[in-house]
Image (cartoon, helix red, strand yellow):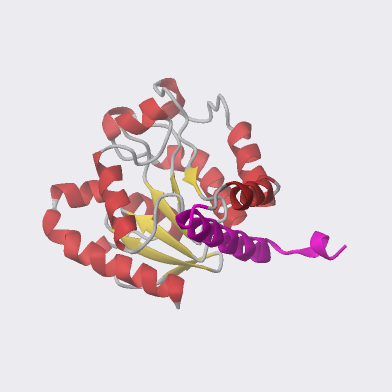
């Protein structure tokens, strides 16, 4: 049947269209039928199933020392067919407690920045290089990144977004294999497995250095332009 040959990209476009239709119908008070159609479609979406299977495969993971002190594995959160994926460093305290990425103070800033380019957290996907909180929120060590990054790469391969935003040095080094400082990398578009990568400052860095928010906003405008172009 023709439906069996629908590509992942086509499914992403159809699902995005359905989501927009649901929002417009909801505005006019029509709620039940479009939402039922939308959720039936997304429930059968292969990308969503693959992400769930991947998350299940790392339950109880003890591949590195970070497992020793964690409360939760923080796999990722958001739209499984998102056109924009944010990659951070690793969970902090609030993320470890809640099991969700970017829910602390830095996460609230990221949410505001996402809203500022006309999106919500439901429109994007958010994950980290490592899935367990490093002690005292230190930078993940090389062997910890080596143990956990294959799961990040698999997440990105499943979603195949239009743009990846690398938040901070750890995400940049993991995806782009470079140790160049952020000020030399930001404002440019790189590539990971055929997907454009736009580096910018980690929200936690922006909280400590608010003067850099203007540069980060320029990067987010670049993201928006690339998504709509």
Picture layout, residue 13 above or below residue 68: below
| Magenta residue check for 32 | no
- Residue 183, can we see it? no
Picture layout, residue 16 above or below residue 98: below
Residue 127 occupies which quadrant of the picture?
A: top left
Towards the viewer: 60 or 14: 14
Q: Position of residue 137 (x, y in %)?
A: 29, 34
Towards the viewer: 34 or 39: 34
Picture layout, residue 173 above or below residue 134: below
Is 100 on the left-hand or right-hand side of 35? left
**Image quadrant containing the N terminus:** bottom right
Towards the viewer: 177 or 210: 210
Give the residue at x 45% y 54%.
124
Residues drawn in magenta: 1-29
Q: Position of residue 192 (x, y in %)?
A: 50, 64
Q: Residue furthest right?
A: 1
Q: Position of residue 112 (x, y in %)?
A: 28, 52
Count of marks placed on residues: 0
- Residue 164, can we see it? yes
Give the residue at x 65% y 38%.
53
The secondary structure that most of the magenta stretch takes on is: helix
Give the residue at x 52% y 61%.
20
Give the residue at x 27% y 62%.
182
**Image quadrant containing the C terminus:** bottom left
Q: Position of residue 220 (x, y in %)?
A: 31, 65
| Magenta residue check for 14 | yes
Q: Residue furthest front?
A: 29
Is 155 on the left-hand or right-hand side of 205? right
């Amino acid at each position: 049947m023709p439906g069996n040959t629908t590509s992942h990209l086509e499914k992403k476009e159809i699902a995005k269209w359905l989501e927009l239709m649901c929002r417009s119908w909801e505005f006019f008070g029509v709620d039940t039928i479009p939402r039922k159609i939308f959720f039936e479609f997304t429930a059968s979406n292969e990308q969503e199933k693959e992400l769930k299977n991947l998350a299940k495969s790392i339950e109880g993971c003890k591949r590195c020392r970070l497992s020793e002190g964690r409360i939760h594995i923080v796999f990722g959160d958001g739209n499984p067919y998102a056109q924009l994926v944010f990659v951070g460093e690793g969970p902090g305290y609030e993320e470890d407690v809640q099991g969700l990425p970017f829910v602390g103070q830095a996460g609230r800033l990221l949410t505001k920045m996402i809203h500022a380019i006309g999106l919500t957290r439901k429109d994007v996907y958010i994950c980290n290089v490592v899935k367990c909180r490093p002690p005292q929120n230190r930078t993940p060590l090389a062997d910890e990144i080596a143990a956990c990054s294959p799961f990040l790469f698999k997440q990105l391969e499943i979603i195949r977004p239009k743009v990846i935003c690398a938040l901070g040095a750890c995400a940049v080094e993991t995806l782009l294999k470079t140790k160049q400082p952020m000020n030399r990398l930001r404002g440019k578009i790189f590539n990971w497995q055929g997907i454009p990568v736009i580096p910018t400052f980690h929200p936690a860095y922006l909280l400590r250095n608010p003067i850099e928010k203007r540069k980060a906003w320029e990067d987010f405008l670049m993201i928006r332009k690339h998504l709509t172009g």
